[in-house]
Amino acid sequence: MSSDVEQLELLRDLAFGYDRDLAFNATTAPAGDGGGLTVERFEITSRYEDRVGGLLLQSVEAEAPRPLILVGHPGTLDKSSDYVLWPAEQWVARGAICATIDQAGHGERAKRPVSMEDFQRWPMRRLDQSLQTVVDWMRTLDYLSERPEVDADRVGFVGFSMGGMRGAPFVGLDERVKAASFCISGASTLSGRGGSAGELADQLTDPGAYAPMMAGRAIQVVAGEHDDLITPEATQRFYDRLSEPRELVWLPCGHWDFMPQGIAPVGPFLERHLAFGG
């Protein structure tokens, strides 16, 4: 093993490490019901005592245990956005359980309004939030895996835009995720702080660096042919680094008009690889 590879692995251990026996101090409360499903708000403690809030959606009629799908929202949105809840409700109706969290710097965790310009303007803030979000997903999966209604052997992930970019290191590092769909996501298109430190920071967060780690698990990439944010070239770079089983779906849309047609291929993919909905 080369010294560069060893250094990167050590950096990843430090960047994404956390105390596995850290108490969740979980709180839960009803957050809505209707249409045959219930919504529960949960909150757990993550690394650095960060409190992470999430929503858990499940059917009132489906038998437990059921597959779990973790859903990552796009940048500037949050766990309560229709962008993630609308598809989640469809997958719940087919027999899954879905969970979404406020990613670092978003939703209830935002200290200030979030804009798209933030992602390019403050690369170190972007780095901090990306690293924290990966750990938050791991902690969320730790917590939900202990719940009796969840089948911890059938865990999937769906990430939209930033949700997929931040979710790629999580999926690559956490082998409990058996299938993942990355929508309007790809290899990094953003520049870091520059210099050697910036290069290492980019290696820690670039989704393309984690694609090879997903080998042996089912990965889907759904992209817009006219995407001007996560370009087709960036999508292709990410996909080319994946191993089988993998699939790439191109849709005649851009980034901002991905919904609603964008989720059409995602549900069938999840059902095939997580064994539900039949």
Image: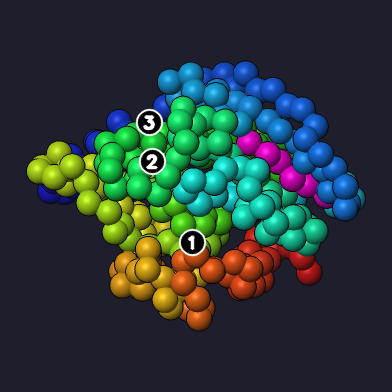
The label number, if any, that marks residue 97 in the structure image: none
**Circle 2 — which element?**
helix
User: Could you give the CA–CA distance between mark 3 and mark 1, rounded to whole angstroms?
Assistant: 24 Å
Name the foreground residue: 276 vs 160.
160
- Location of residue 131 with respect to 234 vertically, above or below: above
Residue under label 2, please give it. 130
Name the spot of residue 165 as percent of width and height, x first: 41, 53
User: Could you give the CA–CA distance between mark 2 and mark 3, rounded to whole angstroms?
Assistant: 14 Å
Residue under label 3, please give it. 17
The mark lying in front, picked from 3 and 1, is 1
Name the foreground residue: 212 vs 197.
197
- Which is nearer the N-term, disc 2 or disc 3? 3
Residue under label 1, please give it. 182
**Circle 3 — which element?**
loop
Q: Does the magenta segment cover residue 132?
A: no
Name the spot of residue 159 as percent of width and height, x first: 52, 55
Name the spot of residue 136 as percent of width and height, x first: 49, 35
Name the spot of residue 185 as percent of width and height, x first: 43, 61
Categorize mark 3 by other alpha carbons within 10 Å: few (<14), some (14-19), many (20+). some
| Quarter occupied by residue 150 | top right
